[in-house]
Amino acid sequence: MNLPDLLQLSGGYWSTCTLHAGVKLDIFTCLTDSAMTTPELARQLSADERGLGMLLHALTALELLHKEENTFRSTAFSATYLSKKSDSYMGHIIMHHHHLVEGWSRLDEAVLRGEPVRQRLSHEALERERESFLMGMFNLASLNAPRIASALELSGHRRMLDLAGGPGTYAIHFCLHNPDLTAVVYDLPTTRPFAEQTIRHFGLSERITFQAGDVLSDRFGTGYDLVWISHLLHSESPADSATVVAKAAESLADGGRLLIQEFILDNTKTAPLFPALFSLNMLLGTRAGQSYTQQELFALMNTAGLCEVNRLSLDLPNGAGVMTGTACR
Ligand SMILES: C[S@@+](CC[C@H](N)C(=O)[O-])C[C@H]1O[C@@H](n2cnc3c(N)ncnc32)[C@H](O)[C@@H]1O
């Protein structure tokens, strides 16, 4: 670390907020449809010309817009990822990040009190925030799910439970990759419309159904060949995580597999960086969530009576990893 790095670390959120404002005002969709001058776009957005002009110039400096003469348009990159009309739109996860900013600005309070400073997005969010959260999960999972699906050997697996599956991204990609697989996406009742719409979009409504339930208090069903739990345990305490993993193990048929994806800390808890920061994100938004170490995840799976507990060798972004265990009664 040197002084310029330190100052960049401290002030980097200016660029973050500039991107968030561009997405929130849907500037990239407007400027993908047609190139516009500041006054033209200001009229369309009912925005102040002076403020909008500054934002457009800053977005151009960030290389997210092109400026020619007095006219702005989206770059090829922003037209692909930041226009709402693109199939690759990443605006949901960007808006989810935006909804987290206020909580992160109060991290010191959360540390002093040891309590969350924001609502839990999966349980208490407003509809708009819930959509950004759940469809943001779709944005992120869409980057990894095809790769994970092709790395896993799932032939012979017929019934999958995507536990806390959100919009069902992993169930969708695992079913696309394995024609004999059917799946149940299990999540809170408020997730149902997002999951059903996403499953329909991929033409998989015949093979993937949604089951409403609470992983802590409700049953999961039995006889599954595969239970997939992705990015759930970090929002639960160690004791509740142990309950979920034990219930998931019980829901497997003999010889069935439990796979758990998490952002995994090494045993010093100081690396990789993303899981270390993600733990703070859980401090801000949950009562007892945290990132777990590989050792802690191994222990949860062994305690649940699973055999052949292992970490798959997958090179995933942000310190993510997939643990596997087999039911061997
Ligand atoms: C971070 S998202 C992960 C979604 C998906 N598994 C993925 O990896 O893309 C966590 C999911 O857990 C669900 N969830 C959280 N607490 C839950 C509970 N008590 N019962 C059922 N689902 C829950 C949320 O609604 C959300 O869909």
Image (cartoon, rainbow, N blue to C red):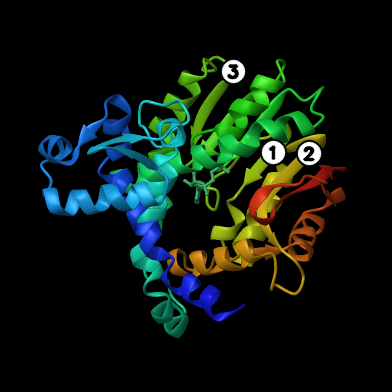
Residue at point 77% right, 55% down?
301
Percent x, y of residue 148: 71, 36
Q: Is mark 2 within 8 Å of ligand 1?
A: no
Percent x, y of residue 280: 52, 69
* In the image, farthest residue toward the front: 69
Q: Circle 3 is placed at which residue position?
A: 207
Sequence-first tag of 2 and 1? 1
Residue 99 figure quarter: bottom left
Horizontally, residue 180 falls left or right of residue 168, namely: right
Task: Work out whether 298 lies above or below 62.
Answer: below
Q: Circle 1 is placed at which residue position?
A: 227
Residue 32 figure quarter: top left
Asked whether 205 or 23 is in front, the reply is: 23
Labelled disc at residue 257: 2
Distance CA(mark 2)–CA(mark 1): 6 Å
Dot 1, how many residues are within 10 Å of its Cα: few (below 14), some (14-19), or many (20+)? Answer: many
Check disc 3 and give the amino acid type. Arg
Sequence-first tag of 1 and 3? 3
- Secondary structure beneath label 1: strand
Percent x, y of residue 101: 37, 62
Residue at point 74% right, 59% down?
297
Q: Is residue 212 visible?
A: yes
Asked whether 221 or 317 is in front, the reply is: 317
Residue at point 69% right, 59% down?
264
Task: Say if mark 2 contacts mark 1, CB within 8 Å.
Answer: yes
Percent x, y of residue 158: 73, 22
- Secondary structure beneath label 2: strand
Sequence-first tag of 3 and 2? 3
Check disc 2 and give the amino acid type. Arg
Check disc 1 and give the amino acid type. Val
- Secondary structure beneath label 3: loop
